[in-house]
Amino acid sequence: MANGPPSAESGGSIFEGATYLASAHSLRDLPLPGPPEIAFAGRSNAGKSSALNTLVRHKRLAFTSKLPGRTQMINFFALRSAAVLVDLPGYGYAKVPATVREHWGAVVSAYLAGRTTLCGLVVIMDVRNPLTSLDEQLLRWFAPRGLPVHALLTKSDKLSRQNAGQALALVRAQLAKLGPDYSVQLFSALTRAGVAEAESTLAAWLSSARLAQDEVIPAP
Ligand code: GDP
C-alpha cells in the first residue's frame, strides 16, 4: 500500500518539523544513541540531500551542493516523533583525496556496522544510473546486519514513465536476490513523486523499532 495511515504522533507526515541535531567528524562525535535512526546513503550527486530535504519539507536542512563530495560529515536530524534521520557523506567522488576517503570510509562503516539504534538504511540512486558497483558494494557489505534497506530511485522526472518503470523492475529484481527486507521505489525531489510511499515504508521501520525498544526497556 503506497499511502499508509497518517501518523497519530504528528497528525500528518512523521518527517515534518525535522531539526538539526548534530554533526560527527569521527566516532567520538556521534550523539549518544537514543531514538531509532534511519540512515541515508548514496553516491555523491545522486540526489541524497534533495531527497532528504523533500521528505522533511525543508528547503535546505540537508546541505545541497553543486560541488559533489563536499559534505564530509555525518549529520543527524531529529524528528518530532522521537526518531533521527542520519545523512551519511556521499561516496564515490573521485576528487576527494584518498586519505580523506579512507578516514570517511572507516567512520561510516563503523557507524553502519555498530550503531545499535540504526533501524534501516535508505540508499539513494539516480534512476538513470542505479546500482553502480559502489552501491552494490555497500549493499553487500551491509546485508549481514539484517536491517531493512529501501532504495529510492530518484530524479524519476528525468525519464519517461516507461523507462522509469523498467529501471524500477530491474533494480527490484536485483535487490530481491539480497533478501526479503529490500524494497525499491521511484522518487523525484522535483515533482515530489514517491514521497508518500517513502514515508509509509520508513514510518513502518520506526514503529517496529519502537516496539523492539519497548521490549528491551521494561516500563517503570
Ligand atoms: P547529493 O550529492 O546526493 O546530495 O545530491 P544533490 O541533492 O545535491 O543533487 C545533485 C543534483 O541533482 C542537483 O543539481 C539537484 O538539483 C539535482 N537533483 C536532485 N534530485 C533531483 C530530482 O528529483 N529531479 C531532478 N530533475 N534533479 C534533481
Image (tube, rainbow, N blue to C red):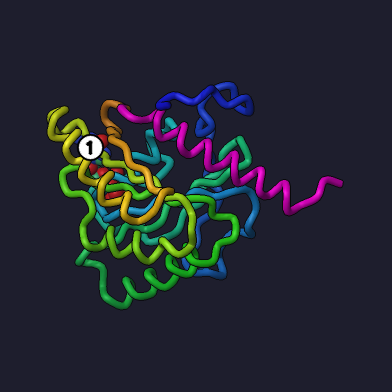
Residue 67, visible in the rendered structure: no
Nearest the eye: 83 or 197 = 197
Residue 83 versus residue 41 in the image, above or below: above
Q: Quadrant of residue 78?
A: top right
Q: Is residue 155 above or below residue 74?
A: above
| Foreground of the two, 179 or 106 | 179
Across and down, in percent, residue 12 comes to 54, 23
Of residues 216 and 173, the one drawn nearer to the viewer in this rendering: 173
Q: Is residue 213 above or below residue 103?
A: above
Residue under numbered circle 1: 155
Q: Is residue 24 left or right of residue 88?
A: right
Extreme residue toward the right, this view: 220
Is residue 198 located in the magenta-colored stretch of the structure?
yes
Query: What segment carries the magenta color?
Result: 193-220
x%, y% of residue 152? 32, 42
The N terminus sits in image quarter: top left
Q: Is mark 1 within 8 Å of ligand 1?
A: yes
Left or right, 15 with reference to 8: left
The residue drawn where x is 59% and y is 21% is: 11
Which of the two residues, 208 or 155, is positioned nearer the viewer here? 208
Give the crowd class for mark 1: few <14, some 14-19, many >=20 residues within 10 Å: many
**Secondary element type, mark 1:** loop
Is 122 left, or right, of 35 in this rendering?
left
- Please report the residue visible at 82 percent of the width from the left and 45 percent of the height from the top: 219
Image height of 104 relative to 158, above or below: below
Q: Quadrant of ligand 1?
A: top left
Magenta span has 74? no
Spot occupied by residue 71 in the image (x, y as percentages of width and height): 35, 56
Give the percent coordinates (x, y) of residue 70. 31, 58
Image-based side of 108 in relation to 132, left or right: right
- Secondary structure mostly taken by the magenta-highlighted segment of the chain: helix
**Mark 1 belongs to which amino acid?**
Lys
